[in-house]
Image: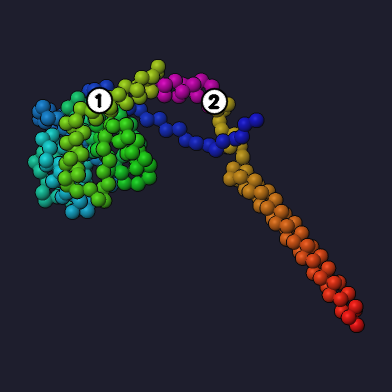
Amino acid sequence: MSLPTQPFNTFILLLDYDNTFNQMKGEEEKEFEAIVNASGEHGIVVFSLGSMVSEIPMKKAMEIADALGSVPQTVLWRYTGEVPPNLPKNVKLVKWLPQNDLLAHPKTRAFITHGGSHGVYEGICNAVPMVIMPLFGDQMDNAKRVESRGAGLTLNILEMTSKDISDALKAVINDKKYKENIQRLSDLHLDRPIHPLDLAVHWVEFVMRHKGAPHLRPAAHDLNWIQYHSLDVFAFLLAVVLLILFISVKCCMFCCRKCCFKKGRKSKSGKSKTH
């Protein structure tokens, strides 16, 4: 007998992991392509803390800028805040960047990220070593998992210094073990019998062929509000606990009365004998 499960949404992430640029349109394509080609043999570093981080304190931004200027690579930094006054020449600030396309480019040497699930997956699939600066949620756990497998390094964004950032970035770029470990993870992740895009197409067509596939519909959709949140179960358990508590109190009161009644009888009998 199976219990109904809560309904859930299925998110399908479609990524192209070929080591070539995906199709990008217009001026943005030409701009990023020119930056990557101009990076020479040193290549590029992709830096993004996600769409939720629009700006950071100026002091921290200046420390990051100092660290980025210590590497010969061209750094593409997705940042929409105030431009640090010490921004080095090798750092290009952009409001948006095609993250997965840049990570898939063979000239990409490192990926500085906040450790979000999608970003970590993109880094793994494209075999790019990571420097992770987790901010909240599951990002700390993602960062530790990557670091424990030797595929990157983790920095505390509140305590890190310019030297910490520079040392971590140089380590993942120059130490071959990080590239080898991330490549091993990438090979494991991509070794599957069906390409993710083909699998997604299959399930979309499956649902269409079977008119919505009602047999895959979670039974929780048929539950009312009380059943869905298990309020009836909680109410039953609460009633059982209250009943047990009530019986326990009554038993204690009964025992107390018995004891008091016996003591009262003994005291009365003792007084009658003395008289």
Residues in magenta, as a range? 198-212
Q: Does 25 appear in magenta? A: no
**Where on the picture, by quarter, is residue 215?**
top right
Q: Main secondary structure of the magenta part?
A: helix
Q: Which amino acid does label 1 sit on?
A: Glu
The secondary structure type at the circle numbered 1 is helix
Q: Give the answer, above or below, for where 83 lies relative to 33.
A: below
Q: Residue 180 carries which label?
A: 1
Q: Give the answer, above or below, for where 52 lies relative to 172.
A: below
Of discs 1 and 2, which sits in the foreground? 1
Left or right of residue 255, residue 203 in this image = left
User: Looking at this view, is 29 or 112 the one in front?
Assistant: 112
Tell me the quarter of the image containing the N terminus.
top right
User: Looking at this view, is 164 or 48 the one in front?
Assistant: 164
CA separation in Å, label 1 and label 2 = 43 Å
Tell me the quarter of the image containing the C terminus.
bottom right
Earlier residue among tags 1 and 2: 1
Is residue 143 among the parts visible in the rendering?
A: yes
Left or right of residue 264, residue 181 in this image = left
Q: Residue 213 carries which label?
A: 2
Across and down, in percent, residue 40 comes to 10, 28
Residue located at (17% from left, 47% from top): 162
Q: What residue type is labelled 2?
A: Ala
**Where on the picture, by quarter, is residue 198?**
top left
The secondary structure type at the circle numbered 2 is loop
Across and down, in percent, residue 201 comes to 42, 22
Q: Badge 1, how many Cα within 10 Å: few under 14, some, many 20+? A: some
Residue located at (65% from left, 46% from top): 233
User: Looking at this view, is 221 or 241 the one in front?
Assistant: 241
Across and down, in percent, residue 41 comes to 10, 27
Report the coloring of the rendering.
rainbow
Across and down, in percent, residue 51 comes to 29, 43
